[in-house]
């Protein structure tokens, strides 16, 4: 009977340790998920800002192409000047 009790006691301790380890792992996983979710949100925000910038550049290209640079009907080349699209002859 005593051996049976000792065996059960050892199993209970092992289960408690295992449970504690699983709880710790769960907390670490939760924190990792929260961090990754925050990173995804930040990346989505950055992507949205860059998409908006690309759309703005596309509008500028269309406007400048339709208007023509320097009033001529010549081929228009665009380059980036100080972060904005500008004409070059």
Image (cartoon, grey):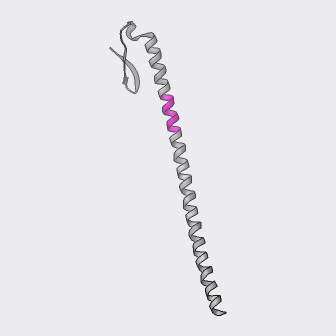
Q: Which residues are magenta?
A: 45-53
- Residue that sits furthest to the right in the current view: 1
Q: Is residue 48 magenta?
A: yes
Find residue 83 and report its horizontal and vertical position in percent: 40, 27
Front one among 13 and 43: 13
Find residue 21 and report its horizontal and vertical position in percent: 56, 70
Q: Where is 74 relative to 26, above or below?
A: above
Picture residue at 51% right of the left edge, 47% below the top:
39
Q: Quadrant of residue 11?
A: bottom right
- Residue that sits furthest to the left in the current view: 89
Q: Quadrant of residue 64?
A: top left
* For residue 27, side relative to residue 50 (left or right): right
Find residue 61 and report its horizontal and vertical position in percent: 44, 18
For the C terminus, the image quarter is top left
* For residue 19, side relative to residue 88 (left or right): right
Find residue 59 and report its horizontal and vertical position in percent: 49, 20
Picture residue at 64% right of the left edge, 84% below the top:
8
Front one among 80 and 17: 17
Picture residue at 61% right of the left edge, 75% below the top:
16
Q: Quadrant of residue 24?
A: bottom right
């Amino acid at each position: 009977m005593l051996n049976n009790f000792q065996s059960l006691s050892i199993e209970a301790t092992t289960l408690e340790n295992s449970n504690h380890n699983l709880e710790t792992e769960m907390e670490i996983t939760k924190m990792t998920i929260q961090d990754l979710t925050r990173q995804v949100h930040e990346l989505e925000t950055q992507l949205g800002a860059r998409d908006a910038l690309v759309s703005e550049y596309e509008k500028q290209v269309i406007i400048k192409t339709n208007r023509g640079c320097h009033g001529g009907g010549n081929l228009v080349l665009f380059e980036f000047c100080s972060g904005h699209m500008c004409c070059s002859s």
